[in-house]
Image: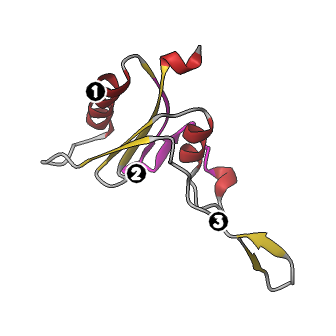
Amino acid sequence: MSEKKSDGSVCPIPQPADLSKVDQVMLDPQPALADYLMAMALANHEADQRLGEHMLLSWYDRDRDFESPQHASECHQDSAVPGYVDYGIHHGARLMVDIHQGRFVFFYLPVGDLE
């Protein structure tokens, strides 16, 4: 899809991320987690259970508006896909753990996929 700009040129309409190859786990623990460290411990536990040996590829902490890899979203200013999501997907993520509806998001790759 594309849209016409005021100058007559055509640009693609930003599309949401294709998460079709990524298992998505949505968690909303109560009481709410205090911070990123607690969220990471919970997400790592989920990855342990679902993937076994794994590697954390990318993550986002909305409380601090901080992502890894750092500055991944800088080149995604006009994109519907944040940089940390794009990085995770394009580096082989097989699991996304979303805690508190996007407050903390983690993308994981099974280590076996590295071989």
The residue mark sitting in front, 3 or 2, is 3
Residue 99: percent from left, percent from top: 30, 46
Task: Decide if residue 66 is on the left or right side of residue 102.
Answer: right
Q: Residues within 10 Å of mark 2 (few under 14, many from 20)?
A: few
What's the distance in space between the residues labelled 1 and 3, CA to CA?
Answer: 33 Å
Q: Amino acid at mark 1?
A: His
Residue occupying the point 87% across, 83% down? 8
Q: Secondary structure at mark 1?
A: helix
Q: Are marks 3 and 2 in contact (CB under 8 Å)?
A: no
Q: Amino acid at mark 3?
A: Pro
Residue placed under numbered mark 1 in the picture: 45
Q: Foreground residue, 22 or 9?
A: 22
Residue 6: percent from left, percent from top: 80, 86
Residue placed under numbered mark 3 in the picture: 14
Q: Is residue 56 magenta?
A: yes
Q: Is residue 61 magenta?
A: yes
Q: Amino acid at mark 2?
A: Arg
Residue 62 bears which disc, if any? 2
Q: Is residue 36 above or below residue 17?
A: above
Q: Are marks 1 and 2 in contact (CB under 8 Å)?
A: no
Task: Decide if residue 111 is on the left or right side of residue 62.
Answer: right
Q: Is residue 1 above or below residue 53?
A: below
Q: Secondary structure at mark 3?
A: loop
Residue occupying the point 12% across, 48% down? 31
The magenta segment is: 55-73
